[in-house]
């Protein structure tokens, strides 16, 4: 019998002063059995940094045809293709061919090697933003993960401050490509 996804419910209060986006949103995150809580919370972080009315989560790790998140307008036009982790060049090229802009949120072991192996190819891509996340901050972010979460997130000057009833963490991504 195959393991099913774990479901996490999020009550999210978002204040993004950089982009003037403010919302109270209820989200459902499905965590694939092979996905870590760190990766799931990076998907939530990406959602916060890129929040819009048309931003949705993809179907997950088992779907090659969709990114982790994407912004698709009602007409079906893909405006953003967002990946989490260390995607292959081919996967980012797929996003480039189908969307107006791509973003990658990356962290974890092997990130520096992945970046060194791919940076020159990524530099050729227009409309690609890569945000490196510090492992220590991602580990702290993962500690906020609960099956039912109430989180306040304030984004200001490129950093995200996450807080729950019991703890908080500041995430300051390092951008490599504008």
Image (spheres, helix red, strand yellow):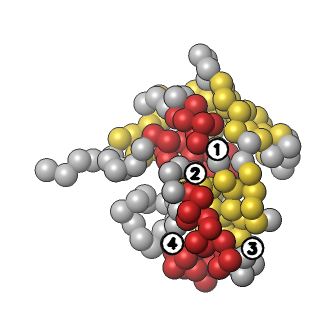
**Circle 3: is it few (<14), some (14-19), or many (20+) Cα within 10 Å?**
some
**Circle 1: is it few (<14), some (14-19), or many (20+) Cα within 10 Å?**
some
Label 2 belongs to which residue? 107
Q: CA distance from mark 1 to mark 3?
A: 23 Å
Q: Are marks 3 and 4 in contact (CB under 8 Å)?
A: no
State whether residue 127 is above or below residue 26: below
Label 3 belongs to which residue? 127
Q: CA distance from mark 1 to mark 2?
A: 6 Å
Residue 58's spot in the image, x, y percent? 49, 60
Residue 134's tag is 1
Residue 61's spot in the image, x, y percent? 40, 59
Residue 125's spot in the image, x, y percent? 70, 79
- Closer to the N terminus: mark 1 or mark 2? 2
Q: Residue at x 51, y 57 (%)?
A: 110
Q: Secondary structure at mark 1?
A: loop
Q: Nearer the viewer, residue 48 or 174?
A: 174
**Circle 2: is it few (<14), some (14-19), or many (20+) Cα within 10 Å?**
many
Q: Are marks 1 and 2 in contact (CB under 8 Å)?
A: yes
- Closer to the N terminus: mark 3 or mark 4? 4
**Circle 4: is it few (<14), some (14-19), or many (20+) Cα within 10 Å?**
few
């Amino acid at each position: 019998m195959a393991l099913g996804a774990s479901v996490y419910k999020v009550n999210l209060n978002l204040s993004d002063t950089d982009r003037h986006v403010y919302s109270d949103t209820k989200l459902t995150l499905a965590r694939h059995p092979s996905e870590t809580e760190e990766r799931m919370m990076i998907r939530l972080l990406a959602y916060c940094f890129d929040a819009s009315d048309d931003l949705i989560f993809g179907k997950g790790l088992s779907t090659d045809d969709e990114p982790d998140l994407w912004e698709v307008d009602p007409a079906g036009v893909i405006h953003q293709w967002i990946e989490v982790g260390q995607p292959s060049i081919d996967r980012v090229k797929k996003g480039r061919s189908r969307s107006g802009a791509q973003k990658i949120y990356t962290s974890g072991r092997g990130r520096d090697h992945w970046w060194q192996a791919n940076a020159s190819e990524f530099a050729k891509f227009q409309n690609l933003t890569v945000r490196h996340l510090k492992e220590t901050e991602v580990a702290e972010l993962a500690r906020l993960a609960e099956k039912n979460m109430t989180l306040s997130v304030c984004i200001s000057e490129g950093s995200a401050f996450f807080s729950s009833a019991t703890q908080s963490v500041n995430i300051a991504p390092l951008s490599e490509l504008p």
